Image: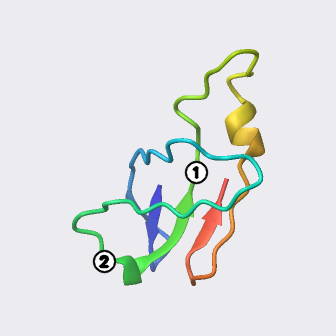
Amino acid sequence: MLFNEAGVVDRLTVLDFKDLPAGKTKVTRFDLSGTDCTKVSRVLINQATDCTGGGIDAAACLKALRTETRSGIAFGI
């Protein structure tokens, strides 16, 4: 979910992070057409829509996700 500067949900979206390598920093660009990024105050990650692999628990991806930002946009899980 993307929240606007007033803290109100502005958009529900699915973002494809592709492969997230263990122990590495990954910077990913998303096309959020029509979104004024200066008005995005917060990004909330509700769920991982696909977490599959041999011996991997379906909830493992979300549990292992750690967020960090160097911008004024807050990220939450």
Of the residues shown, which amino acid type is indicated by label 1? Ile
Q: Determine crowd level at label 2: few under 14, some 14-19, many 20+ residues with C-alpha closer than 10 A.
A: few
Task: Please identify the residue farthest to the top as the structure is shown.
Answer: 54
Q: Earlier in the sequence, mark 1 or mark 2?
A: 2
Instruction: Indicate left or right for 4 with 34 as reference.
Output: right
Q: How is the image coloured?
A: rainbow
How far apart are the alpha carbons under marks 1 and 2? 19 Å
Q: Residue at x 31, y 60 (%)?
A: 31
Quarter residue 39 falls in: bottom left
Residue 77 at x, y = what percent? 67, 53
Q: Is residue 59 above or below residue 18?
A: above
Q: Nearer the viewer, residue 72 or 31?
A: 31
Q: Is residue 23 above or below residue 49?
A: below
Write down the residue under mark 2.
Answer: 36
Of the residues shown, which amino acid type is indicated by label 2? Asp
At mark 2, the secondary structure is loop
Name the mark on residue 21: none
Q: Residue at x 41, y 63 (%)?
A: 29
Residue 6 at x, y = what percent? 46, 78
Residue 30 at x, y = what percent? 38, 59
Name the mark on residue 45: 1
Q: Residue at x 74, y 46 (%)?
A: 22
Q: Nearer the viewer, residue 72 or 27?
A: 27
Residue 9 at x, y = what percent? 43, 61
Q: How many marks?
A: 2
At mark 1, the secondary structure is loop
Q: Residue at x 58, y 51 (%)?
A: 45
Quarter residue 71 falls in: bottom right
